Amino acid sequence: MSPRLAEQHYDSFVQRHLRRNILALGADFALYMVGLAFASQATILPAFAASLGASNVVIGAIPAVTTLGWLLPSLFVAGHTEALPRKLPFMLRYTVWERAPYLVLALVAFAAADRAPAASLAVVLLVLLVTTGVSGALMPAWMDIVGHAVPVTLRGRFFAVSSTVSSLGGLAASFGTAWILAVLPGPSGFGACFLGASAFMALSYAALLFTLEPPALAPAPPGVSLADYLRRIPALLRADANMSWFIAARSCAIVGGMATGFFTVYALRAFAVPAWQVGVFTTMLLAGQLAGNLTFGWLADRTGHRLVLAVGALAMVGANVAALCTPSARLFGIAFALDGVYDSAMLVSGVTILLEMSPSIEQRPTYVGLGRTAVAPVAFGAPLIAGLLVDAAGFSLVFALAGLFAALGFGLMIARVRDPVRAAR
């Protein structure tokens, strides 16, 4: 088939199955995110760890391990992903391993937490590394499927609407977690939350099964060894200064978020709030996400994803300032709401912009993988350093430093990063 006929066949397939794929991929994304609300790394998991007697360093390890798993493996699997003629079978085969581990968390909470809290903490961190590691490895493939199935002019609204649905579902989940933790004392309440996460992960997988992957426009490039593939990356960064500045800006914004894992712990200790208040904080977090989703999809499709990411970094500045200055538990919800706005910006544009930064369709898995893996060491180390700083100097210093780095991330995104779509026009 000639390239012109292949492109016509591709466009026809995308348009013919657009509604089905948007619904299937959107439901997969939304249900997955609702599942994560039942096991939120910002609220539920730190509170569960604190109930097991975790130190500040261990609590800081929760977002560190989670983020490391989500980000680090992407580049190492991107070369293999590029060489696959179809990505969906690869996704369906391995995504089970990012969903099933939430059942293990439930089992730990029900059966082991009271008897062996230290061992339970170790299992929790291991399970988090497994589920997020598989998720990070599969992200280039999933985003490539989205990139083929959803036209560029719809991607911002696709992620915004999907995130809005997930935020509404997450709000309901937050009310549910607040009720569960109020009714079921101790680890059993957290176990019930993790069962809720498992149920929505299973529904998400069922939605993914309905996706129809568009045909490839060109044959997949031949596979290369991992060593040869990784040797190409330094040259790519030297040739693409915009990508290098983007990674720098994202790294600063990630450091700006290093304190979010301590928001819940600080509120529990500073204001002596009951455990069910964690559900209220989750509500505020998801309310911020909802507000961001209602704005950012429209903004991204009209002005580009760079501006969305800049606004997200600015929201993280506000979250840290609110955590630093808020005098009561009721007002402390502002910090979670602004954290939710930041999360929304990342959901709508954090990975989507990488599809557009790629100079070719074939290189999209590489750009997705590079944009995630390059910031993984920062994302892993920042929360751990934050935990050490909390022990050494208190929460206020960590909130202040995080706010400064978020401001730097905002400045770099505005001053040094060019929006790839607008620059191409």
Image (cartoon, helix red, strand yellow):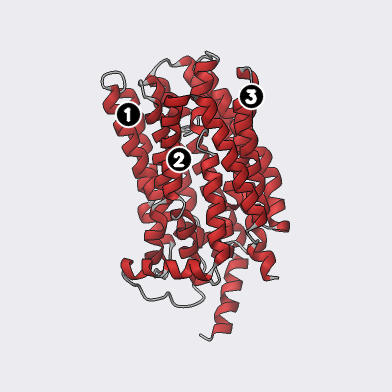
SS under mark 2: helix
Could you tell me which residue is drawn at 61 percent across and 72 percent down?
12
SS under mark 3: helix
Which residue is under mark 1? Answer: 121
- Farthest-out residue, front: 393
Q: Amino acid at mark 2?
A: Ala
Which residue is under mark 2? Answer: 382
Q: In the rendered structure, which disc, 3 or 1, sits on the residue that comes first in sequence? A: 1
Q: In the rendered structure, which disc, 2 or 3, sits on the residue that comes first in sequence? A: 3
Q: Amino acid at mark 1?
A: Leu
Q: Is residue 287 left or right of residue 73?
A: right
Could you tell me which residue is drawn at 26 percent across and 27 percent down?
119
The percent position of residue 93, horizontal first and vertical second, equals 36, 55
The percent position of residue 39, horizontal first and vertical second, equals 45, 33
Residue density around tag 3, few if under 14, some if 14–19, many if 20 or more, within 10 Å = few
Residue 325: which disc? 3
SS under mark 1: helix
